Image (cartoon, rainbow, N blue to C red):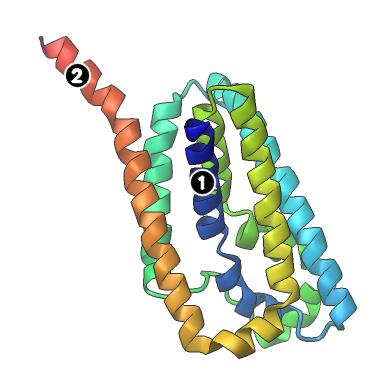
Amino acid sequence: MNDSLSFALLCFTSFFTLINPLGVMSIFMTLTKELTDEERNRAALKACRFSFLIICAFALSGQMLFKFFGISADSFRVVGGVIFFIMGMDMLQARLSEIKVKSSEVKSYVRDISITPLAIPMICGPGAITNGIVLMEDAQFPMQVIILIAVILAVMVLTYFILRSSSTLLRIIGETGNNVMMRLMGLIVMVIAVEFLFAGLKPFVVNILESVQ
């Protein structure tokens, strides 16, 4: 029971901080500023639904991808740890996103921003996809697989409601509050990155020491 609870907590904190719906709010409002409230809600729902399917697809096909490319889960953990650490550094410095949308391009984006850039790469970016694959590798029991999928769904539902209420939330917390929240989540992401990095490096170090002996 404790293992399942710890796994669920790890899944939730890692996905929520990596997806970072609070940080996405400002960009979401910019991309949807010419939409009505109903259209904005529809775009958020479609983006979250698509992101859920993409993350689950990569998580469930992780084993097949590893065999096809001849890579190990430990190597993926190391790479994932590096990616998470870089993302955490950006969040710690309150950089909302690398995506820059010019005012002249907004009209073309609002026609269908649900898939790109809202779902990919803003919600369902490389960090979230990598996290899904690594956590699926760590799921040792069928119950943990169910927990992982349920947590992904829960985070996407929460992300939808945050985006749906983005205009209200931004008014409440303000720009300073948004930056503080992002820095806190960035710190959590960096801690998770260190855990992933050392978990991936440990088998390689053990093998090197055994070969030396």
Quadrant of the image containing the C terminus:
top left
Query: Is there any visible trace of residue 85 in the rendered image?
Result: yes
Instruction: Determine which quarter of the picture holds residue 159.
Output: bottom right
Disc 1 element: helix
Residue that label 1 marks? 9
Q: Position of residue 43 (x, y in %)?
A: 81, 68
Q: Residues within 10 Å of mark 1 (few under 14, many from 20)?
A: some
Seen from the viewer's position, the closer of residues 2 and 65 is 2
Q: Does residue 109 appear left or right of residue 30 in this picture?
A: right
Residue that label 2 marks? 208
Seen from the viewer's position, the closer of residues 50 and 103 is 50
Residue at the spot x=47%, y=74% of the render? 181
Residue at the spot x=63%, y=54% of the render? 124
Q: Does residue 199 appear left or right of residue 138 in this picture?
A: left
Q: Position of residue 154 (x, y in %)?
A: 68, 52
Disc 2 element: helix
